[in-house]
Image (spheres, helix red, strand yellow):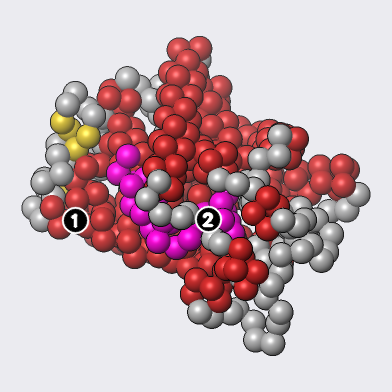
Amino acid sequence: MALDSGNTAFVLVSMALVNLMTPGLAFFYGGLVRSSNVLTIMMQNYASMGLVTIIWVMWGYSLCFGTSKGSGFIGAPADHYFLEDMGEFETSTGNAIPEIVYAGFQGMFAVIAPSLMTGAFADRVRFVPYLIFIAVWVHLVYFPFCHWVWGGGWMFRHGVKDFAGGIVVHTTAGFSALATVVALPNRQKMEGAEVDKSPHNIPFVALGTGLLWFGWFGFNGGSALEANSTAALAAMNSEISASAALFFWMLLEWKLEGKPTLVGACVGAIAGLATITPAAAFVKPWAALLIGILCVPWCYACIEITKKYELDDALDVWAVHGMGGLFGTLCIGIFANKDITGDFEAGGKLFGIQLLAVTGCAVYSFIIGYATIKAIGKFMPVVPGQDDLKLGLDISMHGAKAYSGEDHSGSVKKGRDFANRV
C-alpha cells in the first residue's frame, strides 16, 4: 500500500499541535495558581512530556495499539517495543501513513492526559510522588482505556464511540483528579489559614487558553488521520463549540457574579473544547453550537457542587474536563448524525452504550486514582511539609522562583477570590 504524503504531513502537523497543548496547559494552570507555586505546576506538566513519552516509546504504544490480548483487554507489550516493527497504518478510508507517525500523534494524547490532573491537586503534591503517580496512572488507567476504545479492545467491539478523547482523555483524567482531591487534605487545612485562590497572572491564563485552543485543531481535527472532510468538520465543530461556550459562560458569569471576567471567558472556551471532543466528527455544526451552549450551565453547576461540598479541586479539573468529557460522550447518543458518520446515529441504544461506557470509565478512574495516591502515601510523604509551604513550593522543591524581588510565602489570602476555574 502506497503511503499518502499529504495525509502524512497532516498528521505530522497535528502531532506538533497537540504537543504544543501541554506547554499551553502549563501556562494556563501556571497563571491560575499563586506566584509562589507557578513553576511547580508548570514543571509537573513539562515532566509529563518527558516521562510519559519515554514510557510510550518503550511499551506504552504497544499496550494501547498492539495485538489485542485477553479478549480485548490490553495490547501485546512486545509488539512494538521501542517502536520496532513499525509498518504502515491504514486509515479508515484505506489510505496509509507511516505507523511511526501515528504512534507519535497518539503519544501526545498520552502526555497531556495526566497533565490535566495537575490542576486538581495544585499546591499539594511533592514532585517524586507526582512522577510515581502519573507513571502508575498511565499503566492502570490511560493505556487500558486507550486500547479498549481506540485500539480495537472490548469497548470498541461493543460499539462505544469516542472520536478524540472524551472518554480516553477527559473522563479518565477528570475523575482520577477528583479522586486525588478526595484523598488529599484541602489547602486550607494544610496551611492553617484562608488560602489565596485568585489567579496571580491572568495574561498567562489567556496565553495558555490561546495555545490550547490552537492545539485543539490538531487534537480533534487530526484525529481524522486524513486531510479530508471529516477533519474539516471536527475542526470547525471545535471552533463553534469553544466560541459558543466562551460567550455564554461570560454571560452566565455576568448574570450571577456581576461582572464578566477574562478568566471566566477562558474557562468557558476550554469547557466547550473538552465537551465537543468526543463528538467532534459525529455531529452537524448546529449541534456543536448547541453542545457549546449546554456545556456552560452543566460545567458551571459542577463547579458549584465542588464548592458546596468543600472539594478542593483547585482549578476545577473535574467539573470542566471530567464532567465536560462525560457530557460530550453522552451527546453522541443525542446528536450523532448518520449522514456524517455513515454507519451509526443517535438513538436510545447508542445513548445507553455511551452512558454505560462513560459511567464505567468514571467509576474505574476514580477508584484507581484514589487507590494509587493512597498507596504512594504509605511509602513516602505525598503532601509538602509546613516549611515547604511557608517558603513556597517553587523554591522548596525546585530551587527557583518565577519572579525576582517578591515575597513568596503566599499562604494567607491577600485578594478577592477570583473565578479560579480550569
Residue 190 percent location from the top left of the image: 64, 54
Q: Mark 1 or mark 2: which comes first in sequence? A: 1
The residue most toward the top is 348
Label 1 element class: helix
Give the prevailing secondary structure in the magenta stretch.
helix
* Cα–Cα span, label 1 and label 2: 30 Å
Q: Is residue 147 left or right of residue 116?
A: left
Could you say where residue 196 lies in the image, as x and y percent from the top left? Answer: 75, 60
Contact? badges 1 and 2 (CB < 8 Å): no
Number of dots carrying numbers = 2
**Which disc is residue 383 wearing?**
2
- Bin the neighbour count of mark 1 within 10 Å (Cα to Cα): few under 14, some 14-19, many 20 and up: some
Residue 123 painted magenta:
yes
Q: Which mark is residue 58?
A: 1
Label 1 is placed on what type of residue? Answer: Met
In the picture, the disc for residue 36 is none
**Residue 180 seen in this snapshot:** yes
Residue at the (83%, 64%) spot, across then down: 415
Q: Is residue 198 left or right of residue 183?
A: right
| Residue stretch rendered in magenta on the structure | 118-140
Decide whether residue 379 is among the magenta residues.
no
